[in-house]
Image: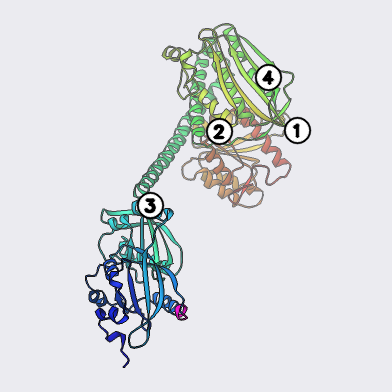
Amino acid sequence: MTLNPEKIAASDLPSLLGLGFDQLRRPIWVFDDVRKRKVYANRAALDLWGAATLDDLLARDFSDQSPAVRTRMEDIAARIEGGAAVEERWTFYPNGAPVTVNTTISRIALPGGGHGMLLEGAAAEIDAQQQRAIEALRHTSALVSLYDADGFRIFGNPASLASYPGSGVRFAEIFANGDAGGALWSSALGGEAVEGAYRVITAQGERWHGLAARRTPDPVTGELCVLVNETDITEEVEAQSALADARELAEAAMAARQDFLANMSHELRTPLTSILGFTDLLAASPLTSEQQRRLGRIHDAGTVLLDTLNDVLDFAKLEAGGVDLETRPFELRALLNKVSGIFEAQALAKGLDLALQVDPACPDWLEGDADRLRQVLVNFLGNAIKFTGAGSVTLSAKYRVGASAGSARLELAVSDTGVGVPAAMLETVFERFAQAGPEVARKFGGTGLGLAISKEIVQLMGGEIGVDSIAGQGARFWCVLDLALAAAPEHRETEAAQDTMRPLNLLVADDNEANRELIGTLVRAMGHEVDVVADGFAAVEAAASGGYDLILMDVQMPRMDGLTATRAIRALGGDTAATPIIALTANVLPDQVAFYRASGMDDHVGKPINPRELLLKIAQWGDARDDGRAKPAGRATDGVQA
């Protein structure tokens, strides 16, 4: 009679087989060859699975093993059918923790017919590398979790279990935003790489986690799973958020400061235009010596105020990175002569010897920002004249070796025999608002910004700046710059264009009555005809009548501002629309000037007005008009600068 193995009591199987498996220390299992179910386990195997008796172990339903396990068992059964033994390594989770054993699997005959699979186990030794990996996984602060295809966690390292305690944890439910969690799960399960920062709900409360999830087979069963790695980045996210808030506040503060500087510049330059302009006009009138002296006091005070304003604005622009260097050829010796010439009268009045020394090895023409370089040297010379009561001041230029091909290295310096710089101040003399002490500040005045501005400019040019001084024995301020060599331009700009140009018919628009009077007087003195109006609306009406060669346009005016008026004039068509328009305004910040050009104005003259600059601009655009150039250099069309 044939016995069905499933009808045999588990306790009877060893005796029927005639084997004493229970006495062995290594785990032994017997599987039915048909359904691949356990039909016997010895005492060592029961201990491994935490079962009290064989019947207790067999009562656990293993019939629903995963397809991957069943496929593996069927493959082994096929391999041992011919009588050969197979060695395999298996990992079990008898108590939730992995246990790895090496097994030898062979085929045995079962009582009453049929065959079974005999598995003999031996504890597998974990090599050092595996042990390190296990310990790292156990002790890392990173959260490592494995989720099955239904989204339930089937494994978590200690960090994961501490953050998401309990059983039945689902991937989508750890997120503060459940919809986002569901979408991420679908993406990960579908094979997409999921990575990013997400808000999650942990046992410690809501946190930000950097999360990476990818699809992977279960290392035990081979079934589809999702492996998730998480790192707590709450502090980093909060720090970035605080930084973003601080940046936003800083940008708002910067914008407010720029608005303040623009308004301050306009409000101060507008009255200074009249103060300096009319003092210049009065100085050319018949006056007594006492009147001339008092007028000079007014002019000097206005000039100091203008210099202070320019220093503040310059430093603000440099500090905010709002200064772009203009690179063009310039003649070195001509530049040095002009800078020296600015201070000849002051040096003569104080009885100082003002000298210029230029190394013959210095090149004639260089390429760079001559205006900014002039500003540095003017600051050096201005301080030297101011702080020197007797003796001499020398401006020098020396050629130094070390520049790359096509460039020249120059050392530009100003030496004096004045009060010098105290040793304690040598390290801070180029810092903002630094002065050589309260006594010096009271005696000589100044903003304490000139040298700070010079340092910013020189560093912007890629050079070095410094000072050598002994208190009471004078000072030597210097800078070293590498400047590109340049050839003399074929055509040099003439400054005498006004001597040969024809009289022009000009329109001046300005809402300030004193400015209209001053500008009208200056322009008429140049030999031109002038009409003046008080706002942009009147300017458009006057321009529409035609006949003007050039328009000088204030920007901030009632009824219609200068920019709106400019756009209206450009829309008139014909020759009138091509009339050059120069912005004549106290707004002088670079972004303001650029905006005026982009809005259709051709050029800019800042207030307080420099008569020489105004004359040159009028000559330049008057010549362009005569040549029939509808869009001379600088003209912007359709809001884009040409």
- Magenta region: which residues? 78-82
Q: Is residue 102 visible?
A: yes
Q: Is residue 183 visible?
A: no
What numbered label is drawn on residue 489? 1
Residue 638 belongs to the span the image colors magenta: no
What is the distance, in whole Å, between disc 3 and disc 1 at their CAs? 72 Å
Q: Position of residue 316 (x, y in %)?
A: 48, 32
- Tell us which disc is closer to us: 3 or 2: 3
- The amino acid pointed to by label 1 is Pro
Q: Position of residue 491 (x, y in %)?
A: 76, 33
- Give the secondary structure at mark 3: helix
Residue 80 belongs to the span the image colors magenta: yes
- Give the secondary structure at mark 4: strand
Question: Which mark sits nearer the N-terminus, 1 or 2?
Answer: 1
- Residue 141 or residue 423, whichever sits in front: 141
What is the distance, in whole Å, between disc 3 and disc 2 at their CAs? 70 Å
User: Which residue bears the numbered disc 4?
Assistant: 398
What numbered label is drawn on residue 367? none
- The amino acid pointed to by label 3 is Ala
